[in-house]
Image (tube, rainbow, N blue to C red):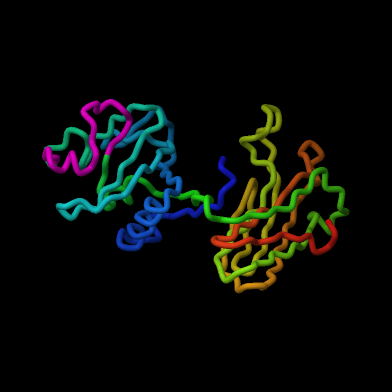
Amino acid sequence: MTGAPKVDYTHKKMTADELWPKLLKHDADKDIMACSSPAGSDKTTDDTGLVQGHAFTLMGAKLMSNGVRMLTIRNPWGSEKYHGNWSDKDSRWTPALKAEAGMKADMDDGIFHMAIEDFMTLFPSSSANFNTENMHYDYFLMLDDSTPPVGDYTTHDLTIVSTADQDVYVTAHTWDRRGLSGKCKNLELTSEFKTPSAYIGFSGSATSTWTMKADDKSIVTVSHDFSNGDLASDWSVVAWGSKAPVYVYAKNGA
């Protein structure tokens, strides 16, 4: 929703020791963090009372004085029934630890706490949108793309130029199914995104990141299947530089 670059973490592919420093840095950098419970109906809960099929805000990460790597999580509904380890009424909480964690007297606010080990077990994934306050971006936008397709796909090459040694985050965008009107919800645009670091098939958006040197040029390729006339042939590529300007140019005059 912010348009900022983001990173996704699949917890089964990581250890707690690998994820923890990343979450600490995201918290220190004031990035927007979130996590998702396992797929399912948000009318159901697991054995710990955690709502399933639901997105939560990851509000912070803190190494506690007792050695617990603690995460603060919030259910956006403003209430939560989690009763697992380090839940609001867990006997492990002492007055000192509650103060350290910033717990409030009002327990019915949707905010709860969890050690990272439990977090990685109960939440299969987490993500962070970068704070873009000190980042720089450029974009290329194409509306009603009428470029003749080659085979099934309309393809464009774009050039990314960096003005400094930095990490760049480049996202290809098309219409996401969730942004479509009711009768179009069952439609899906098939797209591909090729960058120096990845080849991604996607619908909606896909992000790739790599490191560039000053004055480096990288070619990215976006391909879209616009054969379904009920969907708008709109797309864009947005590039973010982590510390200096970055530019996007259409290589083939798109």
Name the residue: 63% across, 61% down: 245
Residue 208 visible in the snapshot: no
How far across and down, in percent of the image, does residue 141 sit?
75, 49
Residue 208 drawn above or below residue 33:
below
How far across and down, in percent of the image, does residue 163 sit?
64, 68
Pick the front one: 165 or 207: 165
Name the residue: 83% across, 58% down: 151
How far across and down, in percent of the image, does residue 148 sit?
88, 54
Query: Which quadrant does the C terminus fall into?
Result: bottom right
Name the residue: 34% across, 60% down: 21
Is-magenta flag for residue 110? Answer: yes
Q: Is residue 233 left or right of residue 120?
A: right
Pick the front one: 207 or 99: 99
Q: Quadrant of residue 59?
A: top left
Pick the front one: 89 or 25: 25
How far across and down, in percent of the image, does residue 26 sit?
41, 53
Q: Is residue 47 left or right of residue 98?
A: right
Is-magenta flag for residue 188? Answer: no
Query: Which quadrant does the N terminus fall into?
Result: top right
The boundaries of the magenta stretch are 93-112
Residue 107 visible in the snapshot: yes
Q: Is residue 95 left or right of residue 226?
A: left
Name the residue: 24% across, 28% down: 107
Residue 166 drawn above or below residue 189:
below
